[in-house]
Amino acid sequence: MGYLFDFLLAIVLTALSYYIGSYLLRKDLSALQALIIGTSVVSLGAITEALNAPMLLIILVPFPVGMILLYLFLKESVKTWFITYLLTLAIYTVIHVMMSYFFKFHSLIPAWKLNDFVLNKMGF
């Protein structure tokens, strides 16, 4: 049950970062589209991890899928898509830091397990 819960939570939090990033820029990414992106990105990361790929690949393989799906769903210019994607990544990173610090949940970015030393250096 633990892995399934972590998997579903990672999907929801990833989808939330895409939805909030789009919402803040007043773009029309629906909650369903954000959930599709989150499910695709997290599933691809999980499949890559199940294949015993190196950690770098587990992190990098899902990125193009999220980028392409965001571009297709937004139906905006490359500039608008890129700004939305950068904002999404920033939100994703903030969510990761909060989940790692408060709940010791590291499944959003598996290779970036924040420990107390790193958080202290970041000012937390």
Image (tube, rainbow, N blue to C red):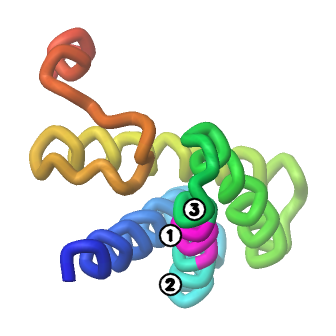
Most common secondary structure along the magenta stretch: helix
Q: Which residue is mark 3?
A: 45
For marks 1 and 2 on the same chain, the one whose residue lies earlier in the sequence? 1
- How many dots with numbers? 3
> Foreground: 41 or 95?
41
Q: Nearer the viewer, residue 26 or 112?
A: 112
- Per the model, the C-alpha gap separating discs 1 and 3 is 19 Å
Image position of 13 with respect to 96: above or below: below
Residue with the most extreme front position: 52
Residue beneath label 2, please? Answer: 31
Residue at the outermost right position: 77
Name the N-terminal-most of marks 3 and 2: 2
User: The magenta stretch spans which residues?
Assistant: 40-47
Give the x, y percent position of residue 49: 54, 59
Residue 101 locus on image (x, y percent): 16, 39
Residue 45: in magenta span: yes
Pointer 1 with pointer 2, Cβ within 8 A: yes
* Residue 12 placement: quadrant: bottom left
Q: Quadrant of the C terminus?
A: top left
